[in-house]
Image (spheres, helix red, strand yellow):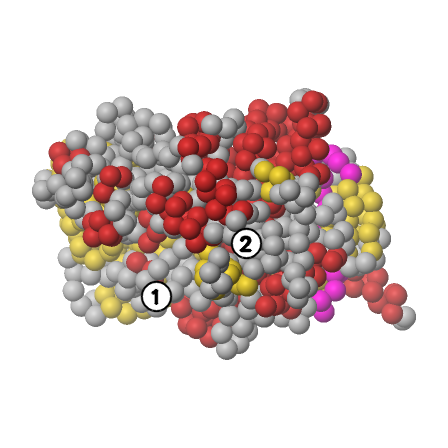
Amino acid sequence: MNAKSKLFLATLAALQIFTARGYAQAPTGKQASKNAMTLWYTQPAKNWLEALPLGNGLLGAMVFGGTSSETIVLNEGTLWAEEPGGRYMPDITKDSAYVFNLIRTGQHAEADLYVTQHWLGRSVPCYESLGNLRVFFDSTGTVSNYVRKLDLNDAVARVSYNRNGVNYSREVFTSYPDHAIIMHLHAGKPGALAFKLGLESEHPTIKTKAEGPNEITFTGQLPGLALRRTLQYVEEHKEQWKYPELFEKDGSRKPFAKEIMYGKDVDGRGMYFQVRIKVLNSNGKVKTGDDGLSVKDAGDVTLAIAIASSYNGFDKSPSREGIDPAKRTRPTITKLAGKTYGQLLATHLADYKKIFGRVSLQLGQPTENSNLPTDQRLLKNAIMPDPTLAALYYQFGRYLVIADSRPGAQPANLQGIWNVDRIPPWGSDYTMNVNMNMNYWGVEAANLSDCHEPLIQFMREASVTGHQTAQQMYHFPGWVMHHNTSLWRDAQPVDWFSYVSFWPMGGGWLCEDLWEHYQFGQDVNYLRNTAYPIIKGAAEFYDHWLVDDGRGHLLTPVSDSPENMFYYTDKDGKQVMGGLTMGSTMDMAIIKEVFANSIKAAKILNVDVAWRQRMEKRFAALLPYQIGSRGQILEYYKEYKEVPPRHNTSPYYPLFPSGQITLRKTPELAAAEQKLMEERGGDGKRGGGFPGAWLATDWARLGRGDMSIKFVNNLVGRNHPNMLNGGGKVFQIDANMGGYAAIGEMLLQSHAGEIELLPALPDKDWPLGSVKGLRARGGFEVGMTWKDGILTVGSVKSITGTSGIVRYREKTVNINLKKGQTIYLDANLKTIKKA
């Protein structure tokens, strides 16, 4: 048998597996780890960053899985401190010419100081914890056979153990259809289950009330002020005037001033909330009182937990114009009355599985570490990377998206929906110079398009407050947002330093999500009614913000590369550091993208011809990307000596998440991006957190799976025991989201006008694998199997009925499919069959 015949038979066999099983699976599927989609442990969580995260977008829960007591940290997505309005809005038109001149004449440090002192506002409001649901069990004795786990296939956290010869188990899940957290407790011996339940919270406003023989409520109010800065910090920076709640007009502290304030100290401001818990089913004795809820002599108990706030919109006071939380929690609980645990679970599974199950992924073969508890697998992965753990990491990222970003919810913040502090790290806010954006990088390609809706709704609201900021702060049309915001959609700069906070590009970056949602879904009505008006508004603002550089190019007059600085020589010949200059690569990339997408959208919709023609001329005049003396992409409009960046990856934006720089269309610029990446530690030897995730995606865009996998392995190995990203006591969800997006980019890319199969496959690390359900721009769904690093079968299904180009390595093929039609291709892109 010749080589060609062997290839044909191998392809045919792979296709039979592909189609018969209904999903893409490698031939060695029978050897797969029994824990392929499960996080599991042999001991309870010791702290919050070992607990297992649950969520339905609206509610979040972190389950500890204790034996003497259970702790579940509760969150609700609208629980933010403070209220809308009342935040300082500078009018920069009074002194913009002065700042522009400082920058043009090379007085960067002076510009930094002036902008910091005059153009920045208050500290951002904080996302708030709610409290800890505590369940204390009336049982003692030695525990054995303990297992705690989270199965990603059903989004249920489970705990089981044996005590005194009795098997105990608990199951917890957050139901999106029922808008509630459900807990089922079971004892293997009738009458052996007894516990007392209450709510512990850092908020001193909590009140407990029995609402009947089997129902209890916990009601409270959040702080009207939760300040990230210390009072001493505010005084040292002479910013007392920004906080009239805390300081007199002469700058002295008010008698009751402190960082966190409630009730009368802040004129009664602050979000109200309520937790309502009901025993739906129990074969034991239930008692409620002002000290909590108790159950005894039971074998099975089902609890329903409803949580709501007084939130009534981003522009309404929750204390003056809010909705009574009881009007939300009571109907939720009432609707569940009479339902069995089995019915509640079935409703949850029917909703969750249809979303999570859209994508299946298998990478490589299990190793000797694949069946270890998850915390041990993470530790050993640094020594011997396990491809099946990378597959779990990818699906865990998708799981987190479903858990913290469902339609009707708030978008994922810096910690998703999970938070345990009143003043969390960085306020657990929406940071739009990478973090919030990264949360949604993989959503469309991972077949989670509906989970994009909270961010799209955020953009609808942000364009409203952003329009007010554009008018009042800049006297410009359109809309703008800076680098940081909250539930209240504040669009003006927050405090800190100029090269961090004065960054009017946040809204423009998020416009990319609006365009991507259209690219993948091809919904013209959405483009017409939502995406185009918002993108056009951002373009209108940037059209007025640009200035001429004196050589015929347009660039931004006040610019930074977020959170980075540079060296320059001042007028006295000294080398000093600056942060503000003109025309950073990040600025120009975002504006190029906003202009280009607004032009494309106007053409598709056949509207605004005159405006579009103006935009085309302005786009052509935008400052082109610059290549420096070492062959590297420049970070700014001219070459400065670099201050070693801690994590700055902003110049990579044109490569990813944008697709302006590509290997085949702009090879010189792609090489320049690679050069800068190599200089900045892009060798894979370090790079956790969101910078590592960004570098993983960038290397994938350059077709370098061998480099991407290094960063992916670093990301996997630097997670907390519960697989959430971070180091020490810090947690940011962005790297989880960027990490799974990077894996998606290694397997499939569609940004360059082609559907490219396995563009950056690390064939030595993942020689064998399969995936099905990935989405590509143009309205396609893609599946692949591969062996020995070579594609065996690729499938492309048209969701909308469109044509396209498929690429594998150096071969391409044009496809033209009807709606719902699938084409199967071999490694030579020859058609095996259509269905």
User: Mark 1 — residue?
Assistant: 728
Question: Residue at image x 75%, y 60%?
Answer: 792
**Closer to the camera in the image, 483 or 163:** 483
Give the amino acid at mark 1.
Answer: Gly
Can you tell which of label 1 and label 2 is closer to the viewer? 2
Secondary element at tag 2: helix
Identify which residue is drawn at 67% across, 34% down: 618
Residue 650: assigned label? 2
Q: Which residues are magenta?
A: 788-803
Is 608 displayed left or right of 241 in the figure?
right
| Disc 1 secondary structure class | loop
Of the 4 image quadrants, the one containing the C terminus is top right
In the displayed structure image, the side of residue 399 where residue 279 appears, left or right = left
On screen, residue 681 versus residue 622, left or right, reads left
Residue 544 lies, in percent from the top left, at: 56, 32
The prevailing secondary structure element of the residues shown in magenta is: strand
Residue 602, numbered circle: none
Amino acid identity at mark 2: Ser
Measured from the top left, where is residue 495 in percent x and y?
34, 45
Please identify the residue farthest to the right as the structure is shown: 2
Residue 795 within the magenta-colored segment of the rendering: yes
Residue 335: x, y in percent?
32, 30
Look at the image and say whether residue 689 sits in the magenta stretch: no
Question: Mark 2: few, some, or many residues within 10 Å (few <14, many ≥20)?
Answer: many
The relative height of residue 146 versus residue 494 in the rendered view (above or below) is below
